[in-house]
Image (cartoon, rainbow, N blue to C red):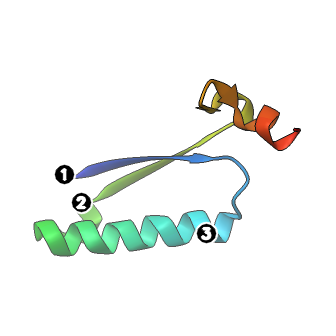
């Protein structure tokens, strides 16, 4: 059973998250010849205060 973990910054619309889950499932199923019902996709949304780039949080970068 393939399991895919995806971490994204918070704030994307629910429709986009659903699209990612659908598209990743399609690709994994086709690539690994695995039934779609066996593919698991976990999407975690990370708060901008918990995502650092170059030593600064994304939320601080946006406020500069």
Residue 11 or residue 35, whichever sits in front: 11
Disc with the residue nearer the chain's start (1 vs 2): 1
Q: Left or right: 62 with respect to 7?
A: right
Q: Quadrant of residue 23?
A: bottom left
Mark 2 and mark 3: span between their CA atoms?
Answer: 22 Å
Q: Are marks 3 and 1 in contact (CB under 8 Å)?
A: no
Could you tell me which residue is drawn at 43 percent across and 72 percent down?
Answer: 22
Name the spot of residue 38 as percent of width and height, x first.
Answer: 24, 60
Closer to us: mark 2 or mark 3? Answer: 3
In the picture shown, does residue 46 fall above or below 34?
above
Task: Answer whether labels 1 and 2 touch (C-beta < 8 Å).
Answer: yes
Q: CA distance from mark 3 to mark 1?
A: 24 Å
Circle 1: element type: loop
The residue positioned 71% from the left and 37% from the top of the image is 58
Residue to which mark 3 is pinned: 16
Q: Which residue is mark 2?
A: 38
Secondary element at image label 3: helix
Position of residue 29 measured from the top left corner of the image (x, y, whole percent) = 22, 70
Task: Name the residue beneath numbered marker 1.
Answer: 1
Query: Which residue does the image show at 58% across and 63% down from the upper left?
Result: 17
Say which label, 2 or 3, has the lower sequence index.
3
Query: Which quarter of the figure is the C terminus placed in?
Result: top right
Horizontal side of residue 21 vs 51, given as left or right: left
- Residue 28: image location, x then y, percent: 24, 66
Q: CA distance from mark 1 to mark 2?
A: 5 Å
User: In the image, residue 31 lies at what x, y percent?
Assistant: 16, 70
Q: Residues within 10 Å of mark 3 (few under 14, many from 20)?
A: few
């Amino acid at each position: 059973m393939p399991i895919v973990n995806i971490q994204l910054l918070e704030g994307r619309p629910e429709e986009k998250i659903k699209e990612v889950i659908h598209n990743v499932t399609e690709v994994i199923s086709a690539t690994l010849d695995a039934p779609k019902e066996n593919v698991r996709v976990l999407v975690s949304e990370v708060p901008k205060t918990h995502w650092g780039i170059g030593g600064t949080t994304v939320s601080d970068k946006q406020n500069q």
